[in-house]
Image: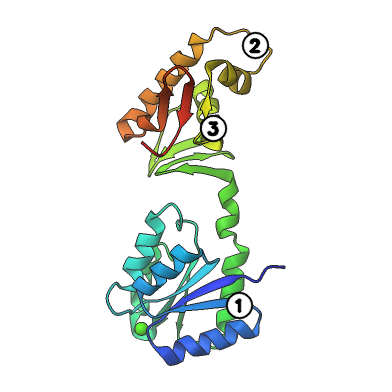
Amino acid sequence: MNAKHILIVEDEQPIREMITFALAGVGYEVREAADARQAQAAISERLPDLILLDWMLPGISGIDFARRLKKEDLTRELPIIMLTARAEEEDKVQGLESGADDYVTKPFSPRELVARIRAVLRRGGPAAEDEILRANGLSLDLASHRVSAGDALLEVGPTEYRLLEFFMSHPERVYSRGQLLDRVWGSNVYVEERTVDVHIRRLRKVLEPFGYEALIQTVRGAGYRFSTRI
Ligand code: CA
């Protein structure tokens, strides 16, 4: 079993070391950061399974950093447990809105912290990501068949949905009209190749108000490609 990897973001060194000691003792892999900048660098290097984030940090506050992480595609699903001091407890609601998954109030016992970490990791987090295809801010939920751009839900017809699902699960490759007919419509169906163009046009029209139509690119003489690179 792979050890879960936890990033601790806390400016007070004694607390950080106490947490590291406690978590390493129960088998977690732990990395430390003293502020949001160090944390960002650590995340870029390797995505942790969970972040313990102190509320009061020098520079960017824990709440602002949590908000930022929840906006990025890469870190949106990353579970966050906020570490707060007693006096800040009344601000919990504000913290919830920042996207934190749970709270632990200082002072806490290592045992309490480990219990909360286990509970949050059990809830899922990045494991659920397989169900959702993402590209920039566009996401397609395979379970609910919903397509959304940020918070907005898109009205996508059934053929356009299948086309988009195919594209998003096969990005950065060119497919000819014939290949798209085979893969999206099925090889037993007789449809003219220009039908593909019609549905591509409809799909682009749905994506256009959100600025995502450029993800579906025409490759002259070859076909179409879904790409986040322009
Ligand atoms: Ca602090």
Q: Residues within 10 Å of mark 1 (few under 14, many from 20)?
A: few
Q: Quadrant of residue 85?
A: bottom left
Instruction: Report the image quarter containing ligand 1.
Output: bottom left
Q: Position of residue 147 (x, y in %)?
A: 47, 36
Which amino acid does the dot numbered 3 rest on?
Glu
Residue farthest to the right, as pictured: 1
What is the quadrant of the N terminus in the image? bottom right
Q: Residues within 10 Å of mark 3 (few under 14, many from 20)?
A: some
Task: List the residue tagged with mark 1.
Answer: 115
Which mark, by number, is residue 165? Answer: 3
Label 3 or label 2, whichever comes before in sequence order: 3
- Secondary structure beneath dot 2 equals loop
Residue found 40% across the figure and 80% down from its top: 84
Position of 197 with respect to 24 (left or right) is left
- Secondary structure beneath dot 3 equals helix
Q: Quadrant of residue 27?
A: bottom right
Label 1 or label 2, whichever comes before in sequence order: 1
Whole-angstrom CA distance, mark 1 to mark 2, is 55 Å
Residue found 57% across the figure and 67% down from its top: 120
Which amino acid does the dot numbered 2 rest on?
Val
Q: Residues within 10 Å of mark 2 (few under 14, many from 20)?
A: few
Q: Position of residue 223 (x, y in %)?
A: 48, 20
Which amino acid does the dot numbered 1 rest on?
Ala
Task: List the residue tagged with mark 2.
Answer: 189
Pointer 1 residue Cβ closer than 8 Å to ligand 1: no
Query: In this rendering, which labeled residue sits more in front, label 1 or label 2?
Result: 2
